[in-house]
Amino acid sequence: MSFTSTSVSVVAAILIAAYSIGQFTSKSIATEIEIAAPASAIWAELANTADYADWNPFLKYLSGDLRVGSTLAVTIQSIGNSTMDFTPTVLVSDEAQELRWIGHLGFKGIFDGEHSFVLEETPMGTTIFRQNETFSGMLAFILFALIGNDTESGFKAMNEALKARVEEKA
């Protein structure tokens, strides 16, 4: 076996191993906040994507149809960092219950992020708003180490801003 074919085989084995490890070592961020409003009021703000720039400190821009199978154009920005644009695909869109999408860096399996907003009404008339993301893929472990804390801070900032906006209108 030549040096070139051996090198290609080694690189291929490393990439396959990294992909496999990335699929089984996903990293997640989970945040939640209680909002003194019904889920329908919170959903109305989430669905009004044209106003995100006015109130949302993390999700700066979102364009597209919030319908299963649709591709969105999204811009996020963690505090103190530059913006990041991506085009996720909507997986779930249940009005006043859940919005979930998945995005990929490059192509599936390199660095994937499945993001969700889940709204759960409580017996007291408030809503628990959960914002979660699970990262997977070959580079998940490495990239999560670089962006995890800033992303979680961005989620929390958005949650607080959403709470303030919805409760102000209630």
Image: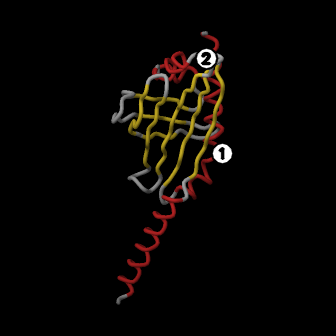
Q: Quadrant of the N terminus?
A: bottom left
Q: Which residue is mark 2?
A: 165
What is the x, y in percent for residue 146? 61, 52
Q: Is residue 8 above or below residue 110?
A: below
Place of residue 12 in the rendered image (x, y in percent of width and height, measured from the top left): 40, 72
The disc, 1 or 2, on the residue closer to the chain's N-terminal end is 1
- State the quadrant of the C terminus: top right
Rendered position, 163 above or below 107: above
Which residue is painted at 46% across and 31% down in the image? Answer: 99
The image's colouring method is secondary structure
The quarter of the picture where residue 127 lies is: top right
Point out the residue furthest to the bottom here: 1
Q: Position of residue 8 (x, y in %)?
A: 38, 77
Q: Which residue is mark 1?
A: 149
Asked whether the residues under the numbered discs 1 and 2 touch, taking CB atoms below 8 Å apart as contact, a structural biologist would say no
The amino acid sitting under disc 2 is: Arg
Q: Residue at x 44, y 23 (%)?
A: 95
Label 1 is placed on what type of residue? Asn
Using residue 119 as the reference point, say whether residue 150 is left or right of it. right
In the structure shown, which secondary structural element does the residue marked by tag 2 occupy?
helix
